[in-house]
Structure formats: C-alpha cells, structure tokens
Image (cartoon, grey):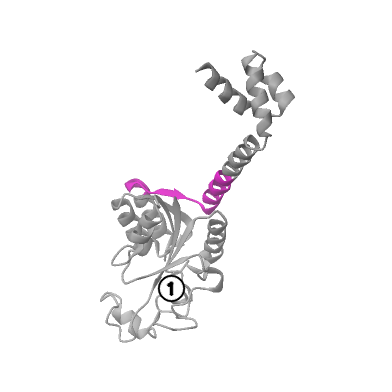
Amino acid sequence: MEAVIMIDMQNGFINKASSLCVRDAEKTVPVCAKVLSEARAAGKMVVIVNRRYREDGVDVEKTRQEVWERGGRPLMPGSTGAISEENPASLAPQASDYVVIKPRFSAFFHTELDLLLRRKRIEKIYLMGTTTPNCIRTTCYDGLSLDYDVAVIEDACSSNTDEIQWVNMEDMKRVGAKILSAEQVITSWKAAGSAAAGAAQEQKGSESYDPVAKQVACEMLLRGLSPDMIAAATGVPYPVLMELKRQIED
C-alpha cells in the first residue's frame, strides 16, 4: 500500500507576503495539486501535513522566533489570508484525506503519522511540499529509519535556491530514497491501475460461463477431447479448462 504525504504547503510558507515564504514553493502548487488529484483517483492514502504556531509563540523554534514575530506571526490557529495556516484552495484537504499537524520539521516528530500509516498497512510513501532541506529531508530520513520505502517527488518540492534543492535531492538519493518526477509517479500509478483492471476483467470472464457447461466440459475432457475444441463448443474459458484438466489428471 502507498501514501502521498504533502508537507507545509500553506499560505504562510507559499505567499510572498509571509516572512517564512520559501522562494519556489508557489511554483510547485500546480504540480502538487495534480499529484493529489491523481493519488485520490488511484485510491492512495493522502496525508496533508501542516504547521501551526500558538499565538504566544511558545512552540515556535528558537531559531525561527525572531523572524516569526517580526513577520506578523504567520501560521497561527484559525488564521486566514496571506500568512495564514490555510492551504491554497487547490491543495485543500478532501473528506478522504488525513490531516496531521506537526510541531517541528519532520512529519513524524511527535505526531500520529507513523501510527496512521501502519494502521493503513502503508509500505511506501511519496513526499512532496516545502521546504526540501528541512521538512522534506527530515521526514525522508525518519521514514527510512522507520523502514518505509521513501520516494521524493522532486518537481513537487521547493527550496530557497537551486543549489540547496539539488544538493539535498542528491543527499536523499544517496541515503536510499528514490527521487522521481511527478510524471513518473503518475504514470506508474496509471500503469498499475490498468494492470489491475485487466486482471479483474480476466477474472470476471473466467466466472461468467454457464455452470452446466462446466459439467459438459468435464465429460468432454474425460473423453480426451482437446481443450481448444471444448472451449469453442461450451464457452468455458481456456484457463478454466486447463485447471479442470489438471484436476482430472491428478
């Protein structure tokens, strides 16, 4: 089972008016929206991981405290607008999604994320969001440490410089994460969906014959007639005939 985890794609990190804005985050919004849509269509678990700071700032990282206070205190509970905790409309959680609020960089740190994933029997996670060197990277490393198969959707992640983005992607790849594009991920989901649909159709076809025909087919097999001839005469699918033949020979 697989899950898509989108991290910190909130106005407080995306909007240029916010003191915590990540330079390239806004560019990735359409890509993230596309991945979310395709993930839901493919039946993947979707987890929206957000950050929220109390009004008095007691839970803001010490390294970020001054910037947070000077910048209008972004991401406060119930906030709306440019520096709010809200996700853009195209990235807003849907009824089937899970929402996790994290207190620090990693989506696993002091959250219920690991519990949710394990209860849903998730083995592989796809990460996207912002910022690559902080929240994506720490979540990636924690995910690997917890023995998840981790993939990072590169063009759905963002940093403040191209150099930071490249170096962190290289580091995550070297430690064992798969670095993929959104197109690669979506194509793999659609291929898997087509294969599953084909298998289901084949199974349905195997079960759609007349039960009486099965008895007739058994009698014809006992008489030594060929499965091809029996399939044409009775309508019983060839794979079913071969299984019957095996059972008779056993």
Residue 200 location, x and y as percent?
A: 59, 42
Main secondary structure of the magenta stretch: helix
Near mark 1 (Cα within 10 A), the count class, few <14, some 14-19 or many ≥20, is many
The answer to which image quadrant residue 152 occupies is bottom left
- Does the rendering let one see residue 53? yes
Residue 3, above or below 84: above
4 or 34: nearer the viewer: 4
Residue 133 seen in the current view? no
**119 versus 18 height, above or below:** above
Q: Which residue is mark 1?
A: 13
Residue 188 at what x, y percent from top left?
Answer: 54, 46
Q: Secondary structure at mark 1?
A: helix
Is 193 positioned to the left or the right of 5 in the image?
right
- Which range of residues does the magenta coloring cover? 173-193
Residue at position x 49%, y 18% from top?
Answer: 250
Position above or below: 229 against 19:
above
Compare residues 93 and 70 and report the one nearer the observer: 93
Which residue appears farthest toward the right when viewing the image?
Answer: 233
